[in-house]
Structure formats: C-alpha cells, structure tokens
Image (spheres, rainbow, N blue to C red):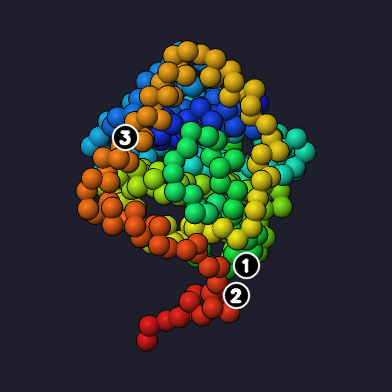
C-alpha cells in the first residue's frame, strides 16, 4: 500500500526528522513536501531527504493568491505522486497521526473501515503546559497534556484532517478532499460536508490527530513570526493560543508506537544531522532576535502570564452556540 503525506513547510527544520520518523513508523510510504522562504535550511534538509529516497521536495515561491499552502495543494493535484497513491492525507508538521487500533498503523485504521473512501481524524489539542524554553527533543515526548476526550467549545479545536483514496476525489483541501467522484463513502457520513467533529462527543476511540499547535513559548513566537501557511501574511496571536492551550489530561498514547529506529536511520546521515543541528541553532537565534523588539517581548510576557484554557461546561458552550443577535 502506498500512503502519501502532503505538507507545506517554512522554517520547521528543527522538527522535521522527528515528524518524518513517526509518520514512516505509522505507515506513510511517500512524502510530497512543498517549501517557501526558508531561512533555517528546511529546504536543504528536504533536498537531502529526496536524494535518500521516499521524499519529493518542491520549492513553492510566491506570490500566492491564497497563501503558500493552497498554492501547494493546486500543484499537488497534478503531481504523479498523488495519482500513484492508494491513500493520501494533507497534514502539517505540528500534527501527528495517532492510531489506537492493532499495531497502531494506517493499515489497522483502514481495516476497521474496509468500505470507506475517506476517514477523518479529529484534532486533539496538546497544550503548552507551561513549557517556556525550546528544546531539541521530540515534540510528543515534550508535550503530553491535552484537551479532555469530550470538549464542548471551541469548535475550532475539533477540526479534522482526512485520510482518503485519491482516485475517488477530484480536488484537495486542507481538511478534507473535495469533488467526490460518484458517492464516496465516509467512515463518518456527517463529516462528508463539514470540517469539524460534533462537540460534546468522544471522537478518539479509534484514532486521533495529535495537534501540537503551540509548542514551547519560545517556539510559539517564532511560529508567529513565520505566519500561517494557508493565509498569506496572517498572524498568530493570543486568541489562537487561548483556543488551543488545553492541558487537562495526560495523553502519552502516541509514544506507544516507537519511531526510534526510523529516527536513528535519519540521524545516521551526516549531512542530515548537520542540517538538523543548524536548524536548531537558527530557531534559538531567531527567538533571541525577536526578543530585541518590544512587540515580541510584550507577546512573550502575555504567554508567561496566561494560564491554560479552561474547558467550558456543556451548558455554557450551548449558550454560545445558540446566541443570536436580534
């Protein structure tokens, strides 16, 4: 089975090898990666990974009408790697596929839905939990505090990404494929027309998409400086932080699938290892540079002062959803 991951990157080299090792362990066989405006050597790392095999790297310079990610998806729709894949998924570097069935691999999830053409995975937000400093260690091991299994608000914390059969859809989307040929079968039919799972339900029994949207406070500032991949020039702020900083329960389930062997094979390449170290150094230097400017110092102070997000009770969440302006 050929399983393709499609992603867009800018200045994420410090996290690339750990992310790639995990997703190879989970069962993705091929990676179609687009980069733009990299200062940390992410693009050079991907050139090396392409030379080693299993990764296709495409530079995606702007300008773009809708941001670099949408431009990348339009290119991916025409790329032979998508046509050759049995399954595909559009995914980000801060998202980790976490399967709770069998050997915790894609084949186990697909086997649970043998007739499905599309299998949505709901985000589970993993909060900052007070981590200030950026460290060179795997993200899933560093951040293990997450949103509760049942979350009533906000709906943005329950968005999905979709594992799907490319031959059944005409268009790619950030969260789900579009333009189904005939009548595609969704593992959850309600998600065939929406981007988020129903609040107030447990969506994580078979699988989840661990979403490490925040990371350390230092890394969050660098992320804000980078901007969003799907909106050119759009910034992150405290509202983004608050909507995602849930730290209510411990969840180490992803660590049950070991990616150590895959990571060791990548680190054994001296070129990749040196590029990784350079990306780590760049990230630390970039944070230090940002802290020389007052707006960034102010944002960093707000992060230090703000406690984790408080999950709302069902009654309060329903009041928000039902509110109408007369």
| Label annotation for residue 294 | none
Residue 34 visible within the image? no
SS at badge 1: loop
Q: Which residue is mark 3?
A: 285
Q: Nearer the viewer, residue 185 or 278?
A: 278
The quadrant of the picture occupied by the C terminus is bottom left
Marks 1 and 2 in Cβ contact (< 8 Å): yes
* Residue in the picture at 47% in, 30% down: 16
Q: Nearer the viewer, residue 160 or 23?
A: 23
Marks 2 and 3 in Cβ contact (< 8 Å): no
Which of pointers 3 and 1 lies earlier in the amino acid sequence? 1
Kindly report the distance in space between the C-alpha atoms of the residues bearing marks 1 and 2. 7 Å
The quadrant of the picture occupied by the N terminus is top right
Q: Is residue 69 left or right of residue 98?
A: left
Residue 150 visible within the image? yes
Across and down, in percent, residue 166 comes to: 54, 35
Estimate how packed mark 3 is, as few (under 14), some (14 to 19) or many (20 or more) residues with alpha carbons within 10 Å: few
Q: Which residue is mark 1?
A: 200
Across and down, in percent, residue 186 comes to: 63, 49
Picture layout, residue 220 above or below residue 273:
below
Kindly report the distance in space between the C-alpha atoms of the residues bearing marks 3 and 1. 42 Å
| Label annotation for residue 314 | 2
SS at badge 3: helix
Estimate how packed mark 1 is, as few (under 14), some (14 to 19) or many (20 or more) residues with alpha carbons within 10 Å: some
Mark 3 vs mark 1, foreground winner is 3
Based on the displayed image, in which of its 4 quarters is residue 3 positioned?
top right
* Residue in the picture at 53% in, 19% down: 267
Q: Nearer the viewer, residue 68 or 17?
A: 17
Which of pointers 2 and 3 lies earlier in the amino acid sequence? 3
Across and down, in percent, residue 316 comes to: 54, 78
């Amino acid at each position: 089975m050929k399983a393709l991951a499609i992603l867009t990157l800018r200045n994420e080299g410090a996290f690339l090898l750990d992310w790639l090792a995990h997703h190879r362990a989970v069962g993705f066989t091929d990676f179609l990666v687009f980069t733009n405006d990299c200062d940390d050597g992410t693009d050079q790392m991907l050139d090396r990974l392409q030379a080693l095999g299993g990764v296709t790297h495409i530079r995606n310079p702007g300008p773009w009408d809708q941001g670099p990610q949408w431009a990348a998806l339009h290119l991916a729709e025409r790329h032979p790697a998508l046509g050759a894949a049995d399954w595909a998924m559009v995914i980000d570097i801060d998202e980790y596929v976490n399967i709770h069935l069998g050997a915790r691999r894609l084949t186990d999830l697909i086997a649970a839905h043998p007739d499905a053409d599309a299998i949505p995975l709901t985000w589970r937000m993993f909060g900052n939990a007070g981590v200030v400093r950026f460290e060179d260690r795997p993200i899933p091991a560093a951040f293990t505090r997450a949103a509760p299994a049942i979350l009533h608000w906000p709906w943005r914390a329950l968005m999905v990404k979709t594992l799907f059969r490319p031959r059944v859809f005409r268009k790619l989307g950030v969260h789900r494929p579009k333009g189904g040929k005939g009548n595609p079968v969704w593992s959850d039919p309600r998600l065939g027309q929406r981007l988020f799972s129903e609040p107030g339900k447990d969506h994580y029994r078979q699988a989840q998409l661990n979403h490490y949207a925040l990371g350390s406070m230092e890394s969050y500032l660098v992320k804000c400086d980078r901007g969003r991949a799907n909106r050119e020039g759009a910034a992150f702020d405290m509202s983004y932080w608050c909507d995602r900083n849930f730290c209510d329960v411990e969840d180490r389930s992803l660590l049950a699938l070991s990616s150590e062997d895959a990571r060791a094979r990548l680190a054994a390449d001296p070129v990749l290892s040196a590029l990784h170290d350079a990306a780590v150094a760049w990230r630390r230097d970039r944070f230090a540079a940002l802290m020389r400017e007052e707006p960034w110092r102010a944002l960093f102070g707000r992060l230090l002062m703000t406690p984790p997000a408080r999950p709302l009770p069902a009654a309060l969440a329903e009041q928000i959803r039902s509110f109408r302006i007369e």
